[in-house]
Image: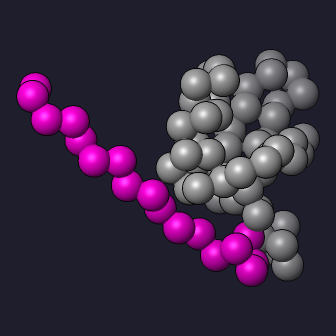
Amino acid sequence: MFFKKKREIKTYDKENRRPVIKASICNGEQIAGFQDIHTGAFEEVMLIRGNDDLAEFMRMYGIEGKIEKIY
């Protein structure tokens, strides 16, 4: 109530994974996560409902710049 929760910056394997947003063509649903560079496997992290969720995902993992969308 009086103390804010410390925001933790998580890490990911930057050599083997890249941050992406997986977007559905049918309904426009967007899911943020990481795609394996070698196999193309996608690991879901969180649902993106708006710009605030996207900003939170980027802040959580220390991502700067633009994130690629895949379909």
Number of marks present in the image shown? 0
Query: What residue sits 76% from the left and 43% below the top?
Result: 21
Image coords of residue 23 (percent x, y): 81, 35
- Quadrant in the picture for the N terminus: top left
Compared with 26, 56 (above or below) is below
- Between 38 and 60, which is closer to the camera in this rendering? 60
Residue 61 vertical placement versus 24 (above, below): below
Secondary structure mostly seen in the magenta stretch: loop
Tell me the magenta residue range. Answer: 1-17
Q: Quadrant of residue 29?
A: top right
Image coordinates for residue 48, horizontal then vertical, percent: 63, 30
Does residue 12 show up magenta in the picture?
yes
Q: Position of residue 7 (x, y in %)?
A: 35, 48
Is residue 46 shown left or right of residue 38?
A: left
Answer above or below: position of 4 versus 16: above
Tell me the quarter of the picture where residue 30 sits.
top right
Residue under the image location 83 percent in, 73 percent down: 37
Residue at (56% x, 56% y) in the render: 61
Magenta span has 66? no
